Amino acid sequence: MRTTRQERYDAVIVGSGFAGANMALLLARAGKRVLILEAGPGLDTTHGELFERYLLATIKTPTAPYPPDAGALDPSRTNAPRPTTEALLFAWNDPARSYLEHAPGSLPFGSTSERLAGGTGNHWMGTAIRMDGADFALHSTYGHGLDWPLGYDDLEPYYGQAEQLIGVAGDRAEQEEVNGIPYGAGYDYPQGSIPPSHGDRIFQAPVDGAAIAADSPAVARTTSTPAGRNAGPFMNRSPCRGSTSCTPICPVRAKYDPREALRSALETGRVELLAKAVVDAVHIDEAGAVTGLHYLTYDDVSVPAATGRTGEAVATAGVYVLAAHAIENARILLNTERVTGRPVANSSGFVGRHLMDHPVYLAWGLMPAAAPFYGYRGPQSTSGIETLRDGPFRRRRAAWRIEIGNGGWTWPIGDPYVTGADFIYGRNDSGTNPERSILSNRQYREAVNGILTRQLRLAFLVEQEADPSNRVELSDTWTDNLGIARPRIRYGVSEYVRAGFASARAATTRIMDLLGATDHTMTSATAPAAFRHDGQDYNYRGAGHMCGTHVMGNAPADSVVNAWQRTWDHPNLYLAGCGSMPSVGTQNPTLTMLALACRTVDDILARPA
């Protein structure tokens, strides 16, 4: 039965992740009544239950702890499916098993997301870095991608607000120095920086001060990475205890996630959360104003679902915010036109276009026996190299930042399990057992320990420019269990990005030489996420940083939203999240997304009553 909710809200927000939950909290603190429509389950599943799901999962992936079951690949019979790591590994190009359908000729889109209370922020790692000034003017400065309709100075106070909401641990002086960006007068991070790991110190001594990129005069400098993670007891949460499972879930809740903001928002008494409510259409009147959001309800989160939709309704308010996700925001807008015949927020034709990620160049090696790295303890990363994020080289190739990993070869190959199994079964999947030895007892223990303690992992987060041919569309064939068309992806990696990978590979060689390490990076030309550049094969991984699809700009003809994330076409509709970003720079985008959300709240509060 179709109904209209009788309650009157000042705002309806779709999605309860970083943007949605924090916007609801800030609006509620300003006295506004807010309804959050969340496609997935609410807060009824405890943190402990989610962590137990992770412990019991056969494959410990970023999506493993969260419902619906990430390993049950049946999106057509799932009420609120999402892209999972399991689908990427086993079925990326099979839409019967993968939520995302890929268009013919597309490379795999390598990132995943969540649909439940807290959103994809449940499985973020915690990295909270500000963008550089040049990142906002990539096209005008270097001739690639798109420019923003605002600059760093416009966003700086909101970066501070976002860092306070998260409780970021960082070193202001260090960040100002290595990134060349000013912080507000008298400002400091809520917490001091996370201490460096043993591996960070081992890495730093031979690498700092060295030139590692041939096309940049800047030298490497290892610095602490600002993070939404507790350096000590803070916000009624435990300090980090070094479990090295930040992604997907911190066992002791030392890592901030949006469920914290969501709980605080609900405690104000001015916010209502309606879970298992999937928005499929935006209603607009003849004047272009949004009059309501149509949504479908369901009960069953199992896969396959025993039941489908249980009802439908329209939520109304004065202001509407889509904060579902870059892909899901585009899906809602595109589906509206499909089911109603009326385009929404798409006079530019750019809805769904400019899909971006950080394609990651992963490198890994073994340190000398005299300088073990001692991974598998601490946060997954505590330090990185930020000094090579900008420079004239960006006219020719994509920039990158280096994340120094504390998790051994977990991300590259699935260790410690793969290396451990190699010496039991006489295999060489890890590349560390070329003789295919089968060992036991003391020999096994010494051999495997001698490898695991020396493992080094580097992740180069390579900038991807906004390209309109990378896009989200709607499938003509595949739906979810509620009957809503699923996303179809067209994705590729430009020559600009590929040149960035070549630079990252050369930098890896230089770093391994400085460390005296042996490079064990493996590349498969036949892997789905592979490309060739200048005679060299490369593989890329997704960073989980889905951006673009409703980019902001200076005019309706070349963008979907303005600098406040308000749609050009509808005065009371906002599209919040990484989808609004016209460039991704090299830093993890979560902090920038939250800063934009804080800025959007100011615009909403400034609207006439």
Image (tube, rainbow, N blue to C red):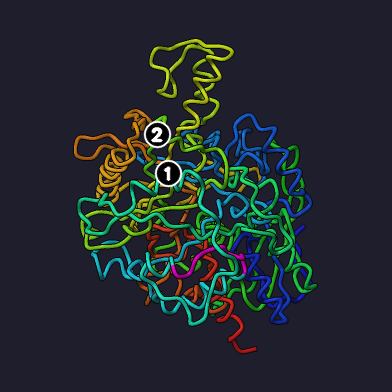
Whether residue 262 is visible to the viewer of this picture, yes or no, is yes
- Determine which residue is flagged by label 2: 367
Place of residue 61 in the rendered image (x, y in percent of width and height, measured from the top left)? 57, 38
Q: CA distance from mark 1 to mark 2?
A: 10 Å
457 to the left or right of 65 = left
Q: Amino acid at mark 1?
A: Ile
Q: Quadrant of residue 271?
A: bottom right
176 to 233, vertically: above or below = below
Disc on res. 107: none
Q: Amino acid at mark 2?
A: Met
| Rendered location of residue 408, percent (x, y) | 49, 36
Task: Residue 381 in the image: state x and y as whole percent.
Answer: 50, 48
Residue 202's disc is 1
Mark 1 surroundings: few (<14), some (14-19) or many (≥20) residues within 10 A = some
Q: Quadrant of residue 424?
A: top right
Between 264 and 143, the residue placed more toward the observer is 264
Mark closest to the chain's N terminus, 1 or 2: 1
Dot 1: element = helix
Residue found at x 41% / y 70%? 176
Q: Magenta span has 377? A: no
4 vs 107, nearest the viewer: 107
- Residues in magenta? 165-173
Q: Total number of numbered labels?
A: 2
Residue 569: x and y in percent read 48, 75
Asked if residue 567 lies left or right of residue 441, the reply is: left
Horizontally, is 235 left or right of 366 in the view? Answer: right
The quadrant in which residue 10 appears is bottom right
Q: Determine the residue positioned at 59% across, 86% down.
A: 607
Instruction: State yes or no: discs 1 and 2 in contact (Cβ < 8 Å).
Output: yes
Is 369 located above or below residue 237 in the figure? above
